[in-house]
Image (tube, rainbow, N blue to C red):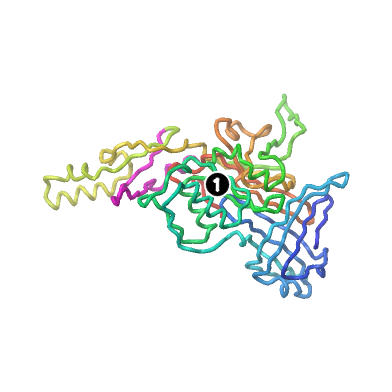
Amino acid sequence: MIGLFNHDGTFFMVESPDVDLKVLMREDVRSLDVTEEMGMMDQGSITFFDRADYYSRVLRPGVKLDIGWGINLTGGQQLKRNKVRVVVNSPGGSGSAQGEKTYTCAFMSLGFRGDRSVVWYEAGTRADVVATVMTKLGVVKQEIDFLRGNEPLTAGTKVCQFESDYAFLVRMANEWRCAFRMGLASDGSIAATFVDYSKLGGSKFAAWVGGGAASVHLEWSGSVVGNRIEYSGKANVLSYTWKDNSADSANGDGTRMVIVDGVPQFYRQVVEGETVKTYRLVPERIEQELGGHDVATRTSILMDYLGAKDFEQVKRFFVEDAVTTAPQGSGIIVNASMIGDPTLTAGLVATFGAGFPDRVGAADRTWWVRKAEHKIDLSGYFTDLEIADAYSFSPTGELLYPSTS
């Protein structure tokens, strides 16, 4: 076991079932970076000074590591994250002009992948499918609660798994607009959540994994009083940025095709004010307008359709359809850098206090931690959070912000 202890009492531990790490020198360990993200396997990197190219020989791709980290508190107590089993992949090194060699072991929790198989699910409910696959993955603590979970599967609505168990759950979460993540609980068992984003407020997953509360409250500074800022004394955010991406939902084609009883149907999602309306294409309306014209005229009309720059120009061929969707949400993404805290993890519900604009943390929606990155080096321990509102996914299933994965 090795550890890095800093002036603020932070540390991490590394063990391996494949390699004896007792010979590793603590002063050779330079940094640890662990990223936990919804719908992604935990990943990160650990960097060593590698003077004699020892670590590059020992820690090869495929070597398993058990990594944990935490904080030494006063009175001998600790806040710590249970060690997570990861696998070294894509390692690399460098040499500086000053003669320093470093070796960086990138890693990922590939043990969560499960088996790759082709399976058709056409019985039970959607929630039953999720539970079945979670059980195959060895998930002991299962949290499954989503709106479409009770929908029955039949020969006409069956779903197919053609990838690994983990990748299948990621795909189903995207299609069914759910939050999904797997992690190691504080008691060492595997935990997983598969819930509607709006239900993260009642989720137990973050507490299972982080060992703390299911929510985090963020405060940056305080309130402006006269010509000065008065701090509340609860500030825990070092810095933050935020961006409103809601207008992105109006970009792109906003169109999707759905096969219903073997017949393709085309839908167009349009942002109108604070809501998203869904329109279904009615091919018969196009046929009626084209009817009675010769080939040249029909071709000219079709070219006008294809050259339309605005939905209003072709809206007459669509009918507004009743499609149940989630609210649009704000599309606001907040990135906050905080003092390191091992209890912070992806899936937490976030609330905002002093120092944030009123648009950030609006009370009419759920704000959740999409990504948590824990970074420990000789300068200390810091945790960066990426926070979104519960409906930063549009009703079309498309992200309202660019993915950084």
Residue 184: image location, x then y, percent = 67, 53
Q: Residue 316 or 154: which is nearer the viewer?
A: 154
Q: Is residue 273 above or below residue 87?
A: above
Residue 30: image location, x then y, percent = 77, 61
Can you say which quadrant of the picture contains the N terminus? bottom right
For badge 1, the amino acid type reads Phe
Q: Residue at x 29, y 37 (%)?
A: 319
Mark 1, Cα crowd under 10 Å, few <14 / some 14-19 / many 20+, is: many
Q: Residue at x 17, y 49 (%)?
A: 298
Can you say which quadrant of the picture contains the C terminus? bottom right
- 262 in magenta: yes
Question: Tag count in the figure?
Answer: 1
- What residue range appears in magenta? 245-272
**Residue corresponding to mark 1:** 194
Q: Residue at x 26, y 47 (%)?
A: 305
Left or right, 50 with reference to 355: right
Q: Residue furthest top?
A: 226
- Residue 317 occupies which quadrant of the picture? top left
- 384 in magenta: no
